[in-house]
């Protein structure tokens, strides 16, 4: 029985999304050390020493059909600079969440994230015929919430005491979504952001 969505590589000008594999391990270990991202208590970014286990976990979720993990490749260097996924996959209702995303500090606030979101959303709505795409993040993660809102996603609500974090604190999860009818406008907005001249 095939897993939905099928494996695919998505390529743009700044970024390429490849199916995650152990071939990306060394690059992702370097990327995780760039900015010591694992120190951010309100996210779940692996330490470089735990990267192999994280790749194994994501690939196991892929086998179960609940996640489709990607390595984010910087087109200018050819190196993996982060991870992203389709997760909480609901094949029957054609819904996915874009999440478990992180980037090396040097890749943040670059065109890479915008282009990755454009490619993932385009694939979800135009090839997979999704009716909605979700985004979830910690309520206190203002950087992530601002980035999601800049995409044009709407806040559906907050799941209070939704998860127990590694440090024992309780996470309130902000849930956002983009629905199919909103995609043409959001696509035009993301394309405009990528095309406008940069300083």
Image (spheres, rainbow, N blue to C red):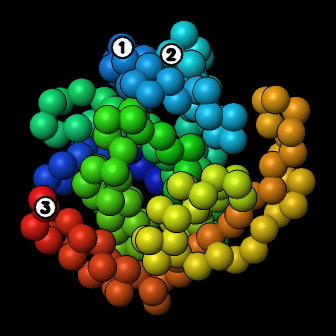
Q: Position of residue 65 (x, y in %)?
A: 60, 44
Badge 1 element? helix
Q: Are dots 2 and 1 in contact, CB under 8 Å?
A: no
Left or right placement of residue 54 versus residue 140 in this view: left
Read off the residue under disc 2. 48
Whether residue 59 is visible to the viewer of this picture, yes or no, is: no
Badge 2 element? helix
Read off the residue under disc 3. 198
Q: Between disc 2 and disc 3, whose residue precedes?
A: 2
Which tag is nearer the camera, tag 1 or tag 3?
A: 3
- Above or below for 78 versus 4: above
Q: Between disc 2 and disc 1, whose residue precedes?
A: 1
Crowd rating for badge 2 (residues with CA inside 10 Å; few <14, some 14–19, many 20+): many
Left or right placement of residue 169 versus residue 184 in this view: right
Marks 1/3: CA distance? 31 Å
Marks 2/1: CA distance? 9 Å
Who is closer to the viewer here, 84 or 92? 84
Q: Between disc 1 and disc 3, whose residue precedes?
A: 1
Whether residue 69 is visible to the viewer of this picture, yes or no, is: yes
Q: Quadrant of residue 122?
A: bottom left
Read off the residue under disc 1. 26
The tally of labels here is: 3
Q: Residue at x 47, y 62 (%)?
A: 147
Q: Position of residue 66 (x, y in %)?
A: 63, 46
Q: Quadrant of residue 150?
A: bottom left
Who is closer to the viewer here, 84 or 10? 84
Badge 3 element? loop
Crowd rating for badge 3 (residues with CA inside 10 Å; few <14, some 14–19, many 20+): few
Q: Position of residue 69 (x, y in %)?
A: 48, 40
């Amino acid at each position: 029985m095939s897993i939905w969505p099928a494996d695919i590589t998505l390529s743009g000008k700044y970024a390429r999304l490849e199916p995650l594999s152990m071939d990306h391990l060394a690059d992702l270990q370097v990327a995780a050390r760039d900015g010591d991202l694992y120190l951010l208590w309100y996210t779940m970014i692996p330490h470089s020493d735990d990267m192999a286990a994280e790749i194994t976990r994501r690939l196991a979720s892929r086998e179960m059909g609940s996640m489709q993990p990607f390595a984010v490749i910087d087109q200018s260097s050819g190196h993996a600079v982060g991870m992203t996924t389709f997760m909480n996959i609901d094949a029957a209702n054609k819904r996915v969440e874009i999440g478990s995303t992180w980037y090396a500090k040097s890749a943040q606030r670059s065109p890479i994230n915008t282009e990755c979101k454009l490619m993932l959303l385009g694939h979800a709505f135009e090839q997979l015929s999704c009716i909605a795409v979700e985004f979830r993040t910690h309520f206190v993660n203002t950087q992530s919430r601002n980035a999601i809102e800049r995409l044009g996603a709407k806040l559906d609500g907050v799941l209070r005491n939704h998860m127990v974090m590694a440090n024992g604190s309780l996470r309130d999860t902000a849930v956002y979504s983009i629905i199919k009818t909103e995609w043409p406008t959001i696509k035009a907005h993301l394309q405009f952001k990528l095309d406008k001249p940069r300083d």
